[in-house]
Image: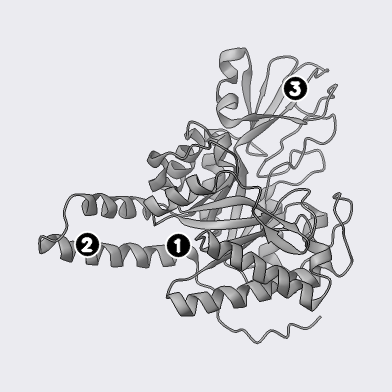
Amino acid sequence: MPDNRTRTKERKPQKHRKLWFAVMLAMLTGAMTATGIMAGPADAAIQEEHSMHKRNGRTVMYIMDEAGMTLRDDDAHKLDQLNYSFALIRDGRADGSHWRGTRRVTEFLRKHPHIDGVMSVGGWGADGFSDACMTEEGRKTLADSILALMDEHGFVGVDIDWEYPGVPGTGIVSREEDVENWYALLQLLRDGLDAREAAKGREYILSVALGAGESHLKVIDPARLNRLIDQAVVMAYDLSGFDRTTGHHAGLYSDGNGGHGGAHAVESLINRGLAPERILLGMPAYGRVWRQVTGGGDGLSQRAATSGNKTLSFDEVLRLTDSGYARHYDDEAQAAWWFDGSSFVSADDDRSIGYKCGWLMKKGLQGAAVWQYTQDASGAMLAMLDAALRK
Protein backbone atom coordinates (compact mmCIF):
# COMPACT_ATOMS: atom_id res chain seq x y z
CA MET A 1 0.00 0.00 0.00
CA PRO A 2 1.39 3.47 -0.85
CA ASP A 3 2.32 5.76 2.04
CA ASN A 4 -0.20 8.62 1.86
CA ARG A 5 0.78 10.39 5.06
CA THR A 6 1.20 14.14 4.76
CA ARG A 7 3.44 14.43 7.79
CA THR A 8 7.03 15.19 6.75
CA LYS A 9 8.80 16.05 10.01
CA GLU A 10 11.64 13.72 10.93
CA ARG A 11 11.69 12.67 14.56
CA LYS A 12 14.77 13.82 16.46
CA PRO A 13 16.66 11.12 18.41
CA GLN A 14 15.92 11.27 22.12
CA LYS A 15 19.57 11.52 23.16
CA HIS A 16 19.96 14.80 21.24
CA ARG A 17 16.93 16.29 22.95
CA LYS A 18 18.37 15.34 26.34
CA LEU A 19 21.67 17.02 25.55
CA TRP A 20 19.84 20.26 24.74
CA PHE A 21 17.99 20.01 28.05
CA ALA A 22 21.22 19.53 30.00
CA VAL A 23 22.93 22.51 28.34
CA MET A 24 19.98 24.81 28.98
CA LEU A 25 19.69 23.67 32.58
CA ALA A 26 23.39 24.24 33.16
CA MET A 27 23.28 27.75 31.64
CA LEU A 28 20.21 28.77 33.61
CA THR A 29 21.35 27.32 36.89
CA GLY A 30 24.87 28.72 36.49
CA ALA A 31 23.47 32.21 36.03
CA MET A 32 21.21 31.86 39.06
CA THR A 33 24.03 30.53 41.22
CA ALA A 34 26.35 33.37 40.16
CA THR A 35 23.78 35.93 41.28
CA GLY A 36 23.19 34.20 44.57
CA ILE A 37 19.67 33.11 43.71
CA MET A 38 20.48 29.41 43.83
CA ALA A 39 23.24 27.24 45.24
CA GLY A 40 23.80 23.73 46.52
CA PRO A 41 20.88 21.67 45.16
CA ALA A 42 21.32 23.26 41.74
CA ASP A 43 24.89 22.00 41.61
CA ALA A 44 23.62 18.50 42.33
CA ALA A 45 21.05 18.80 39.54
CA ILE A 46 23.75 19.85 37.06
CA GLN A 47 25.98 16.99 38.16
CA GLU A 48 23.12 14.55 37.65
CA GLU A 49 22.44 15.88 34.16
CA HIS A 50 26.11 15.93 33.19
CA SER A 51 26.59 12.42 34.56
CA MET A 52 23.62 11.21 32.56
CA HIS A 53 24.94 12.54 29.28
CA LYS A 54 28.26 10.76 29.47
CA ARG A 55 26.38 7.65 28.39
CA ASN A 56 26.55 6.69 24.74
CA GLY A 57 23.01 5.39 24.64
CA ARG A 58 19.63 5.88 26.22
CA THR A 59 18.55 3.73 29.19
CA VAL A 60 14.89 2.79 29.30
CA MET A 61 13.32 0.65 32.01
CA TYR A 62 9.85 -0.81 31.87
CA ILE A 63 8.23 -0.93 35.30
CA MET A 64 5.34 -3.28 35.97
CA ASP A 65 2.55 -1.83 38.04
CA GLU A 66 2.26 -3.31 41.52
CA ALA A 67 1.28 -2.16 44.99
CA GLY A 68 4.17 -1.16 47.23
CA MET A 69 6.74 -0.87 44.46
CA THR A 70 10.07 0.68 45.42
CA LEU A 71 11.87 3.19 43.22
CA ARG A 72 15.40 4.04 44.26
CA ASP A 73 16.64 7.64 44.09
CA ASP A 74 20.16 6.26 43.59
CA ASP A 75 19.02 4.87 40.23
CA ALA A 76 17.78 8.21 38.89
CA HIS A 77 21.03 9.36 37.27
CA LYS A 78 21.28 6.01 35.44
CA LEU A 79 17.81 6.33 33.89
CA ASP A 80 16.50 8.31 30.92
CA GLN A 81 13.02 6.85 30.74
CA LEU A 82 10.47 4.75 32.65
CA ASN A 83 7.76 2.89 30.71
CA TYR A 84 4.85 2.38 33.12
CA SER A 85 3.14 -0.92 32.27
CA PHE A 86 0.37 -1.48 31.35
CA ALA A 87 -2.77 0.39 30.46
CA LEU A 88 -5.31 -2.09 29.11
CA ILE A 89 -8.07 -1.79 26.52
CA ARG A 90 -11.62 -2.19 27.79
CA ASP A 91 -14.65 -1.54 25.60
CA GLY A 92 -12.42 0.06 22.99
CA ARG A 93 -10.82 2.57 25.37
CA ALA A 94 -7.59 2.74 27.32
CA ASP A 95 -8.10 1.96 30.99
CA GLY A 96 -5.86 2.33 34.05
CA SER A 97 -8.41 1.65 36.78
CA HIS A 98 -6.45 -1.46 37.82
CA TRP A 99 -3.24 0.48 38.53
CA ARG A 100 -1.90 0.37 42.10
CA GLY A 101 1.49 2.06 41.85
CA THR A 102 0.73 5.18 39.84
CA ARG A 103 1.29 7.62 42.68
CA ARG A 104 4.75 6.23 43.50
CA VAL A 105 5.83 6.40 39.86
CA THR A 106 4.56 9.93 39.25
CA GLU A 107 6.16 11.18 42.48
CA PHE A 108 9.48 9.65 41.41
CA LEU A 109 9.22 11.31 37.99
CA ARG A 110 8.43 14.71 39.52
CA LYS A 111 11.45 14.35 41.82
CA HIS A 112 13.70 13.48 38.86
CA PRO A 113 12.38 15.56 35.93
CA HIS A 114 15.12 14.47 33.53
CA ILE A 115 13.47 11.01 33.39
CA ASP A 116 10.73 10.75 30.76
CA GLY A 117 7.63 8.95 31.98
CA VAL A 118 5.97 6.93 29.20
CA MET A 119 2.69 5.02 29.48
CA SER A 120 2.77 1.53 27.96
CA VAL A 121 -0.46 0.11 26.56
CA GLY A 122 -1.16 -3.58 26.02
CA GLY A 123 1.42 -6.24 26.81
CA TRP A 124 1.54 -9.99 26.30
CA GLY A 125 -1.95 -11.49 26.11
CA ALA A 126 -3.68 -8.09 26.28
CA ASP A 127 -6.64 -8.13 23.93
CA GLY A 128 -8.71 -5.31 22.48
CA PHE A 129 -6.41 -3.76 19.87
CA SER A 130 -7.82 -5.56 16.85
CA ASP A 131 -11.47 -4.95 17.73
CA ALA A 132 -10.90 -1.30 18.63
CA CYS A 133 -8.92 -0.60 15.46
CA MET A 134 -11.30 -2.20 12.97
CA THR A 135 -12.92 1.12 12.05
CA GLU A 136 -11.80 4.72 11.71
CA GLU A 137 -14.16 5.72 14.50
CA GLY A 138 -12.86 2.96 16.76
CA ARG A 139 -9.23 3.95 16.16
CA LYS A 140 -9.99 7.57 16.98
CA THR A 141 -11.82 6.60 20.16
CA LEU A 142 -8.90 4.42 21.27
CA ALA A 143 -6.24 7.01 20.38
CA ASP A 144 -8.13 9.82 22.15
CA SER A 145 -8.58 7.70 25.28
CA ILE A 146 -4.87 6.73 25.32
CA LEU A 147 -3.81 10.37 25.09
CA ALA A 148 -6.35 11.45 27.72
CA LEU A 149 -5.09 8.79 30.16
CA MET A 150 -1.51 9.86 29.46
CA ASP A 151 -2.40 13.50 30.18
CA GLU A 152 -4.34 12.60 33.33
CA HIS A 153 -1.28 11.03 34.94
CA GLY A 154 1.32 13.47 33.64
CA PHE A 155 3.18 11.09 31.33
CA VAL A 156 5.04 12.49 28.32
CA GLY A 157 4.71 9.65 25.89
CA VAL A 158 3.01 6.43 24.84
CA ASP A 159 4.42 2.96 24.17
CA ILE A 160 2.13 0.73 22.10
CA ASP A 161 2.73 -2.91 23.01
CA TRP A 162 0.40 -4.78 20.64
CA GLU A 163 1.66 -8.37 20.68
CA TYR A 164 1.41 -8.75 17.71
CA PRO A 165 -0.47 -7.10 14.82
CA GLY A 166 -0.97 -9.46 11.90
CA VAL A 167 0.35 -12.52 13.75
CA PRO A 168 -2.32 -15.09 14.70
CA GLY A 169 -1.90 -17.72 17.39
CA THR A 170 -0.96 -15.44 20.29
CA GLY A 171 -4.23 -15.94 22.15
CA ILE A 172 -5.81 -12.61 21.20
CA VAL A 173 -8.11 -11.57 18.36
CA SER A 174 -6.15 -11.26 15.13
CA ARG A 175 -7.16 -10.04 11.67
CA GLU A 176 -5.34 -9.78 8.37
CA GLU A 177 -5.86 -5.99 8.31
CA ASP A 178 -4.34 -5.48 11.78
CA VAL A 179 -0.98 -4.23 10.48
CA GLU A 180 -2.54 -1.41 8.43
CA ASN A 181 -4.80 -0.54 11.34
CA TRP A 182 -1.74 -0.46 13.62
CA TYR A 183 -0.08 2.11 11.38
CA ALA A 184 -3.32 4.13 11.30
CA LEU A 185 -3.51 4.09 15.11
CA LEU A 186 0.11 5.22 15.35
CA GLN A 187 -0.62 8.11 12.98
CA LEU A 188 -3.49 9.30 15.19
CA LEU A 189 -1.27 9.10 18.26
CA ARG A 190 1.55 10.92 16.48
CA ASP A 191 -0.82 13.71 15.47
CA GLY A 192 -2.12 14.02 19.03
CA LEU A 193 1.37 14.08 20.52
CA ASP A 194 2.53 16.66 17.97
CA ALA A 195 -0.39 18.91 18.92
CA ARG A 196 0.73 18.69 22.55
CA GLU A 197 4.31 19.46 21.52
CA ALA A 198 3.17 22.62 19.76
CA ALA A 199 1.06 23.71 22.72
CA LYS A 200 3.51 22.92 25.52
CA GLY A 201 6.91 23.44 23.91
CA ARG A 202 8.35 20.02 24.68
CA GLU A 203 8.51 16.84 22.64
CA TYR A 204 6.39 13.80 23.40
CA ILE A 205 7.54 10.22 22.82
CA LEU A 206 5.80 7.61 20.70
CA SER A 207 7.24 4.12 21.07
CA VAL A 208 6.31 0.67 19.79
CA ALA A 209 7.36 -2.73 21.09
CA LEU A 210 8.34 -5.16 18.33
CA GLY A 211 8.74 -8.91 18.48
CA ALA A 212 12.12 -10.30 17.47
CA GLY A 213 10.85 -13.41 15.74
CA GLU A 214 10.65 -13.86 11.97
CA SER A 215 6.85 -14.07 12.06
CA HIS A 216 6.67 -10.72 13.87
CA LEU A 217 9.06 -8.92 11.55
CA LYS A 218 7.99 -10.13 8.13
CA VAL A 219 4.45 -8.70 8.32
CA ILE A 220 5.51 -5.08 8.89
CA ASP A 221 7.24 -2.44 6.75
CA PRO A 222 9.82 -0.94 9.13
CA ALA A 223 10.56 2.07 6.89
CA ARG A 224 7.04 3.38 7.44
CA LEU A 225 7.78 3.83 11.14
CA ASN A 226 10.44 6.51 10.70
CA ARG A 227 8.04 9.46 10.50
CA LEU A 228 5.71 8.10 13.13
CA ILE A 229 7.74 6.93 16.11
CA ASP A 230 10.62 7.99 18.31
CA GLN A 231 11.45 4.50 19.53
CA ALA A 232 11.11 0.86 18.51
CA VAL A 233 11.83 -1.55 21.36
CA VAL A 234 13.06 -4.85 19.92
CA MET A 235 12.05 -7.48 22.48
CA ALA A 236 15.17 -9.60 22.09
CA TYR A 237 14.31 -12.03 24.87
CA ASP A 238 12.11 -15.11 25.33
CA LEU A 239 13.75 -16.34 22.13
CA SER A 240 13.78 -19.82 23.65
CA GLY A 241 12.13 -21.39 26.67
CA PHE A 242 8.89 -22.69 25.19
CA ASP A 243 10.02 -26.27 24.60
CA ARG A 244 12.05 -28.79 26.57
CA THR A 245 15.40 -28.18 24.91
CA THR A 246 17.65 -25.80 26.82
CA GLY A 247 18.96 -22.71 25.06
CA HIS A 248 19.71 -19.00 25.26
CA HIS A 249 16.57 -16.97 25.69
CA ALA A 250 18.30 -13.61 25.09
CA GLY A 251 21.42 -14.35 23.08
CA LEU A 252 22.62 -11.58 20.81
CA TYR A 253 23.42 -14.18 18.14
CA SER A 254 22.06 -17.62 17.25
CA ASP A 255 22.63 -20.51 19.64
CA GLY A 256 23.21 -22.84 16.68
CA ASN A 257 19.90 -24.64 17.09
CA GLY A 258 18.06 -22.88 14.30
CA GLY A 259 16.88 -19.86 16.28
CA HIS A 260 17.95 -16.26 15.81
CA GLY A 261 19.34 -13.78 18.31
CA GLY A 262 18.54 -10.14 18.89
CA ALA A 263 21.14 -8.94 16.37
CA HIS A 264 19.29 -10.65 13.53
CA ALA A 265 16.06 -8.84 14.40
CA VAL A 266 17.73 -5.45 14.68
CA GLU A 267 19.66 -5.87 11.43
CA SER A 268 16.52 -7.02 9.62
CA LEU A 269 14.71 -3.85 10.69
CA ILE A 270 17.63 -1.63 9.65
CA ASN A 271 18.09 -3.38 6.31
CA ARG A 272 14.42 -2.83 5.57
CA GLY A 273 14.55 0.88 6.30
CA LEU A 274 14.11 1.60 10.01
CA ALA A 275 16.66 4.19 11.17
CA PRO A 276 19.04 2.70 13.77
CA GLU A 277 18.70 5.76 16.03
CA ARG A 278 15.04 4.82 16.55
CA ILE A 279 15.88 1.33 17.86
CA LEU A 280 16.24 0.24 21.49
CA LEU A 281 17.67 -3.23 22.09
CA GLY A 282 15.49 -5.06 24.59
CA MET A 283 17.17 -6.95 27.44
CA PRO A 284 15.64 -9.08 30.22
CA ALA A 285 16.14 -8.54 33.94
CA TYR A 286 15.26 -12.19 34.50
CA GLY A 287 16.40 -15.68 33.65
CA ARG A 288 14.53 -18.73 32.35
CA VAL A 289 14.86 -22.08 34.10
CA TRP A 290 14.69 -25.63 32.68
CA ARG A 291 14.52 -28.42 35.28
CA GLN A 292 15.60 -32.07 35.37
CA VAL A 293 17.98 -31.69 32.44
CA THR A 294 19.39 -34.93 31.04
CA GLY A 295 22.45 -35.58 28.93
CA GLY A 296 25.13 -34.29 31.27
CA GLY A 297 27.90 -31.95 30.17
CA ASP A 298 27.30 -28.26 30.61
CA GLY A 299 23.54 -28.59 30.06
CA LEU A 300 23.31 -26.53 26.86
CA SER A 301 21.05 -27.86 24.08
CA GLN A 302 19.94 -30.78 26.24
CA ARG A 303 16.48 -32.17 26.88
CA ALA A 304 14.72 -31.37 30.14
CA ALA A 305 11.60 -32.54 31.95
CA THR A 306 10.17 -29.02 31.71
CA SER A 307 10.27 -26.10 29.33
CA GLY A 308 11.93 -22.89 30.47
CA ASN A 309 8.65 -21.71 31.94
CA LYS A 310 9.99 -20.78 35.36
CA THR A 311 11.75 -17.43 35.77
CA LEU A 312 14.24 -15.96 38.24
CA SER A 313 14.83 -12.28 38.91
CA PHE A 314 18.21 -10.79 38.01
CA ASP A 315 19.23 -10.72 41.68
CA GLU A 316 18.39 -14.42 42.02
CA VAL A 317 20.45 -15.16 38.92
CA LEU A 318 23.47 -13.38 40.40
CA ARG A 319 23.28 -15.61 43.50
CA LEU A 320 23.25 -18.90 41.57
CA THR A 321 26.98 -19.53 41.90
CA ASP A 322 26.54 -19.38 45.68
CA SER A 323 24.01 -22.23 45.36
CA GLY A 324 26.24 -24.72 43.56
CA TYR A 325 25.69 -23.60 39.96
CA ALA A 326 28.59 -23.34 37.51
CA ARG A 327 28.51 -20.30 35.23
CA HIS A 328 29.18 -20.80 31.51
CA TYR A 329 29.49 -18.43 28.55
CA ASP A 330 28.85 -18.92 24.84
CA ASP A 331 31.27 -16.70 22.89
CA GLU A 332 29.40 -17.24 19.63
CA ALA A 333 25.94 -16.34 20.91
CA GLN A 334 27.28 -13.84 23.49
CA ALA A 335 25.09 -15.40 26.16
CA ALA A 336 25.57 -16.70 29.69
CA TRP A 337 24.03 -19.69 31.41
CA TRP A 338 24.24 -21.52 34.72
CA PHE A 339 23.99 -25.27 35.35
CA ASP A 340 24.05 -27.38 38.51
CA GLY A 341 23.76 -30.78 36.86
CA SER A 342 19.97 -30.72 36.89
CA SER A 343 18.63 -27.17 36.46
CA PHE A 344 19.67 -24.92 33.57
CA VAL A 345 19.29 -21.12 33.77
CA SER A 346 19.59 -18.78 30.77
CA ALA A 347 20.09 -15.08 31.56
CA ASP A 348 22.23 -12.03 30.94
CA ASP A 349 25.24 -11.20 33.10
CA ASP A 350 27.80 -8.41 33.21
CA ARG A 351 29.73 -9.89 30.27
CA SER A 352 26.74 -10.30 27.92
CA ILE A 353 25.35 -6.89 28.92
CA GLY A 354 28.72 -5.30 28.22
CA TYR A 355 28.98 -6.96 24.82
CA LYS A 356 25.43 -6.01 23.84
CA CYS A 357 26.03 -2.39 24.81
CA GLY A 358 29.24 -2.25 22.80
CA TRP A 359 27.42 -3.74 19.82
CA LEU A 360 24.44 -1.39 19.97
CA MET A 361 26.72 1.65 20.25
CA LYS A 362 28.66 0.54 17.16
CA LYS A 363 25.37 0.07 15.32
CA GLY A 364 24.27 3.58 16.25
CA LEU A 365 21.16 2.42 18.11
CA GLN A 366 19.33 4.77 20.45
CA GLY A 367 20.06 2.61 23.49
CA ALA A 368 18.67 -0.26 25.54
CA ALA A 369 15.29 -1.06 27.10
CA VAL A 370 14.99 -3.51 30.01
CA TRP A 371 12.03 -5.59 31.11
CA GLN A 372 11.58 -4.81 33.97
CA TYR A 373 12.61 -2.64 36.93
CA THR A 374 11.12 -4.58 39.85
CA GLN A 375 13.01 -7.73 38.76
CA ASP A 376 16.25 -5.80 39.36
CA ALA A 377 15.58 -5.15 43.04
CA SER A 378 19.19 -4.32 43.93
CA GLY A 379 19.78 -2.15 40.86
CA ALA A 380 22.67 -4.40 39.80
CA MET A 381 21.57 -4.76 36.17
CA LEU A 382 20.89 -1.06 35.76
CA ALA A 383 24.35 -0.32 37.17
CA MET A 384 25.95 -2.76 34.69
CA LEU A 385 24.01 -1.20 31.82
CA ASP A 386 24.95 2.31 32.85
CA ALA A 387 28.64 1.41 33.17
CA ALA A 388 28.70 -0.38 29.81
CA LEU A 389 27.10 2.57 27.98
CA ARG A 390 29.75 4.95 29.35
CA LYS A 391 32.66 3.08 27.75
Q: Tag 2, which secondary structure?
A: helix
Q: Earlier in the sequence, mark 3 or mark 2?
A: 2
Question: In the rendering, at what x and y percent does residue 179 appear?
Answer: 80, 68
Q: Residue at x 48, y 45 (%)?
A: 104
How many neighbours does mark 2 have within 10 angstroms: few (below 14), some (14-19), or many (20 or more)?
A: some
Q: Which residue is mark 3?
A: 299
Q: Residue at x 89, y 67 (%)?
A: 176
Q: Tag 3, which secondary structure?
A: loop
Q: Nearer the viewer, residue 266 or 68?
A: 68
Question: In the rendering, at what x and y percent does residue 335 appear?
Answer: 64, 36
The kind of residue tagged 3 is: Gly
Residue 276 can be seen, yes or no: no
Q: Quadrant of residue 27?
A: bottom left
Of all residues, the one furthest to the top in this rendering is: 324
Q: Quadrant of residue 305?
A: top right
Q: Earlier in the sequence, mark 1 or mark 3?
A: 1
The kind of residue tagged 1 is: Lys
Question: In the rendering, at what x and y percent does residue 20 appear?
Answer: 36, 68
How many neighbours does mark 3 have within 10 angstroms: few (below 14), some (14-19), or many (20 or more)?
A: many
- Give the spatial CA distance, label 3 vs label 2: 56 Å
Residue 216 vertical position relative to residue 358 in the rendered view, above or below: below
Q: Which residue is mark 1?
A: 15
Q: Which residue is mark 2?
A: 29
Q: Earlier in the sequence, mark 1 or mark 2?
A: 1
> On the rendered image, what quadrant is the N terminus found in?
bottom right
Of all residues, the one furthest to the front in this rendering is: 97
